[in-house]
Amino acid sequence: MARKQQDDAPAPAAQPAYKVVKREKDRWWEVRDPQDELVCVAVYKRGAVEVVRRLAA
C-alpha cells in the first residue's frame, strides 16, 4: 500500500473557457462555449464578458 490512491486516478482534463467573439460585419458580441456552440448574443462587449464571468463562477 505504498502507492497513493491519487496516483491511480487520471489527471482531470483542462476545460477550455468560454470565449467572446465579435460578429463579422455586425456590432453584436457572441459568447461561445468550449464546444463552440452559441450561448448568448450581447450588444456590448462588456455585457458578453460579464456573462462569461458569471458562467465561469
Image (cartoon, helix red, strand yellow):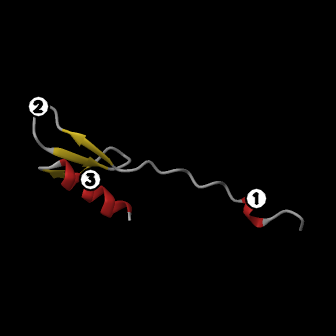
Image location (x, y in percent) of residue 31:
25, 49
Report the residue at 76% width, 66% height from top: 5
**Amino acid at dot 2:** Lys
Task: For label 3, count other residues whose C-alpha is less than 10 Å away and answer few (under 14), some (14-19) or many (20+).
Answer: some
Q: Where residue 35 appears, x then y in whole percent?
A: 37, 46
**Residue drawn at the location 52% of the way across and 50% of the way down:** 14
Residue corresponding to mark 1: 7
Front label number (2 vs 3):
3
Q: CA distance from mark 1 to mark 2?
A: 50 Å
**Could you tell me which secondary element the residue under label 1 belongs to?**
helix
Question: In x, y percent, where is residue 47?
Answer: 19, 55
From the viewer's perspective, tell me whether residue 7 is left or right of residue 17: right
**Quarter of the image where the C terminus is located:** bottom left
Considering only order in the chain, which callout, 3 or 2, is on the residue closer to the N terminus? 2
Q: Could you tell me how far apart the alpha carbons at marks 2 and 3 are, in whole angstroms?
A: 20 Å
Tag 3 residue? 49
- Depth-wise, is mark 1 or mark 2 nearer the camera? 2
The correct choice, above or below, for 53 with respect to 45 in the image is below
The residue where tag 2 is placed is 25
